[in-house]
């Protein structure tokens, strides 16, 4: 079994990070093709986690830019809440 290295990496299981994406993509496809059927769902979940993290990072960056540009302000948030409550009163 591989030993755990620094920062949670697995020694003996590392992949060089300087591989050109054009070369890496077919390698990943080949790895997926070799997976056992029972491991495909776990691989899919891992890929979805990667995609979710990418999207969350994009949303964080967009939100930061919106705050910095004044597109989002405390006042605009309060006004949006008031408008929503006006349109959708509690019953």
Image (cartoon, helix red, strand yellow):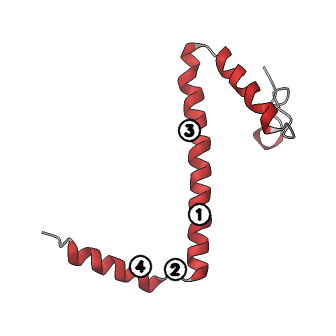
Is tag 3's residue or tag 4's residue first in the polypeptide sequence? 3
Q: CA distance from mark 2 to mark 4?
A: 10 Å
Q: Who comes first in sequence, dot 1 or dot 3?
A: 3
Q: Residues within 10 Å of mark 2 (few under 14, many from 20)?
A: few
Badge 2 marks a residue whose secondary structure is loop
Residue bearing mark 4: 77
Q: CA distance from mark 2 to mark 3?
A: 30 Å
Look at 28% across and 79% down and name the residue there. Answer: 83
Could you tell me which secondary element the residue under label 4 belongs to?
helix
- In the picture shown, does residue 30 fall above or below 80? above
Within 10 angstroms of label 1, few (less than 14), some, or many (20 or more) residues? few
Tell me the residue that label 2 is attached to: 71
Vertical arrangement, residue 52 with respect to residue 43, above or below: below
The residue drawn where x is 57% and y is 52% is: 55
On screen, residue 60 versus residue 31, left or right, reads left
Q: Secondary structure at mark 3?
A: helix
For the N terminus, the image quarter is: top right
Residue 6 location (% of width, % of height): 83, 41
- Mark-to-mark CA distance, 1 and 3: 18 Å
- The Cα atoms of the two marked residues, 4 and 1, are separated by 17 Å
């Amino acid at each position: 079994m591989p030993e755990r290295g620094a920062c949670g990496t697995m020694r003996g299981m590392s992949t060089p990070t300087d591989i050109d994406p054009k070369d890496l993509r077919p390698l990943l496809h080949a790895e997926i093709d070799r997976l056992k059927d029972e491991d495909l769902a776990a691989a899919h979940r891992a890929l979805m986690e990667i995609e979710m993290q990418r999207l969350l990072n994009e949303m964080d960056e967009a939100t930061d830019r919106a705050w910095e540009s004044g597109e989002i302000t405390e006042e605009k948030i309060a006004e949006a809440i008031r408008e929503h409550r006006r349109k959708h009163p509690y019953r």
